[in-house]
Image (cartoon, rainbow, N blue to C red):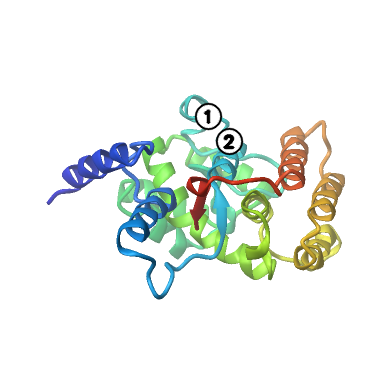
Amino acid sequence: MNRQTTTRRLKSIQRRLGLEDDGILGPVTLTRIESILDDVLGPEASQPEHNLIVSRRGLDQIAQFEISSEGFYKRHLARPTWPGGASGITIGIGYDLGYNSKAQIIRDWGGKLSDEELGELVAVAGKKGEEAEAVLSTVDHIKIPFEAAKEVFYTATLPRFARLTRKAYPGIEALPADAQAMLLSLVFNRGSRMSGIRRKEMKAIQPLVIQKDLDGIAREIRAMKRLWDVSLLPGLHTRRDEEARIITDADRAYDPSEFVLV
């Protein structure tokens, strides 16, 4: 069976499940299938492997932070960009080539781009800040299809960062789903390193997670805005404020269909 046929069948299944028919076997679709199997056959003795239980709303918010919308992506982000600051060249949905190894880029994007395009992107791996800005012109002719960007985001990037987030914040699995999603957003954006003065708020969140102090976590996330000039990087100020707001309101009633295992 060729890939086109498989994708068409998957889209049909997704429509029957009431999901977006994007043809991506990612955490949203897998969680829905597992839920139906639990209802029909009963829960497995061993639960499916996952690191976080996030909300659909939270996942959608992370994607919105990164690309705003599908239309905006196709108009402005389909080609590699340099967001500024300490970022590397970024492709797809928030995929920073500066913070991914050559081997990881090949694993994630192999088969989704031509070998020539992949080779050009690998050549700028690890470059950050002004060094990344200087080489942007060597890759900004490459177009990343939205479908490929979504597939990498949901099947490769999110699961990897979910593991990093759970490792960075022990006890996170006891927080409400929206809060887990926003801490995933934070680590996705800033990484999981905790040492250094620029990371003091990241570190300060660790005991607050164990204490389930949502207001305290939100306070530390807002405090991070000190790091970025709002006139140069207003988007990061908006992102931190929104992450904090969602975490503050995360202790709410959830419908079981909202939960996504990542």
Q: What residue lies at 68% left-to-right and 41% top-to-bottom?
A: 84
- Residue 237 is left or right of residue 95, and the answer is right
Q: Is 3 situated left or right of 141 in this image?
A: left
Residue 205, quarter of picture: bottom right
Count neighbours of disc 2 (C-alpha within 10 A) and say few if under 14, some if 14 to 19, many if 20 or more. Answer: some
- Determine whether, in the image, residue 214 is placed left or right of residue 138: right
Badge 1 element = loop
Q: Position of residue 85 (x, y in %)?
A: 72, 44
106 or 138, nearer to the observer: 106
Q: Position of residue 183 (x, y in %)?
A: 67, 54
Residue name at image x 12 percent, y 51 percent:
1
Quadrant in which residue 232 is drawn? top right
Q: Position of residue 73 (x, y in %)?
A: 50, 30
Q: In the figure, 75 relative to 108: above or below?
A: above
Amino acid type assigned to the residue bearing label 2 in the image: Gln
The residue to which callout 2 is attached is 64
Task: Give me the C-alpha separation between circle 2 and circle 1.
Answer: 6 Å
